[in-house]
Image: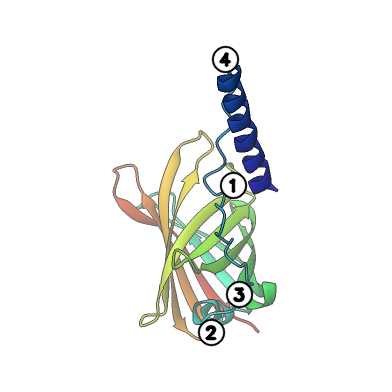
Amino acid sequence: MRKATLISVVVLSIGWWVGSVYSGDEPKKQPTPSTPPATAKTEGEKQPEMKPVEVTPQHKVLHHYVGEWKVESKHWESPDGPPTVGYGKRTYRLALNGLALVCEIQLTSDQGDYTGMGITTWNTMTKKYDSVWVDNYCYNGIDRMDGVYDEATKTFTSSAVGTMPDGTKIPYRIVSKEESNDKIVEQFFMAGPDGKEFRTMEGTYTRVK
């Protein structure tokens, strides 16, 4: 349909120009036809065939986490301050026939209740793991992050930018290491008041089932 419309515009424009020349009249200024989108295909070109994404070995790395995990969380407000300890559970389940991992977490501590959920998948184009996360402290709605996995150390390393209540953007990174098949230690790092990175949070996950 787009190609037919474009051809019609070209044909009408040429016909108008030829008719004006041979009639001896000055051609009237006509609006320039809009340029077709850069994604438009010329005659003879074909749109790439869309096929469903297949589960790759990188997707299967995420499958290991499926199940329910007990959580002990520590949160530091400053590099030299005492941590606030929280307890709860974290559950993982697969979605999209194994292409995505859905995570949900619930924690209780002296600071109050924390709930959150996220989705992670393998990006076959960037060759990284893409994640989105939302919780009851997400002032900017949804956090987005990307990460890599080191098979040798069984460690995920992700990076993102968080938003504080005053709108300040703070880069942070997450290092999640599988200590065993049933234990994961996850640490959050961000810059402190002096600009130096420090550990702001650490969660220890123990598989329940």
* Tag shown at residue 11: none
* Residue 200 placement (x, y as % from top left): 42, 55
- For marks 2 and 1, the one nearer the N-term is 1
Quadrant position of the C terminus in the picture = bottom right
* Mark 2 neighbour density, 10 Å: few (under 14) some (14–19) many (20 or more): some
Disc 3 from disc 2: Cα separation:
10 Å
Query: Which comes before the other along the chain, label 4 or label 1?
Result: 4
Which residue is located at x 62 percent, y 30 percent?
A: 15
Amino acid type, mark 2 = Asp
Residue 182 image label = 2
Is tag 3's residue or tag 2's residue first in the polypeptide sequence?
3
> Which of 76/16 is in front?
16
**For the residue carrying disc 3, how many other residues have a C-alpha within 10 Å: few (<14), some (14-19), or many (20+)?**
many
Work out how far the residue at label 2 is from the one at label 1, CA to CA, in angstroms.
Answer: 29 Å
Of labels 2 and 4, earlier in sequence is 4
- Of badges 2 and 4, nearer the viewer stands 4
Give amino acid for label 3.
Lys
What residue is disc 1 on? 138
- Three-letter residue code for mark 4: Gly
The label on residue 24 is: 4
| Quadrant of res 70 | bottom right
Horizontal placement of 184 versus 20: left or right? Answer: left
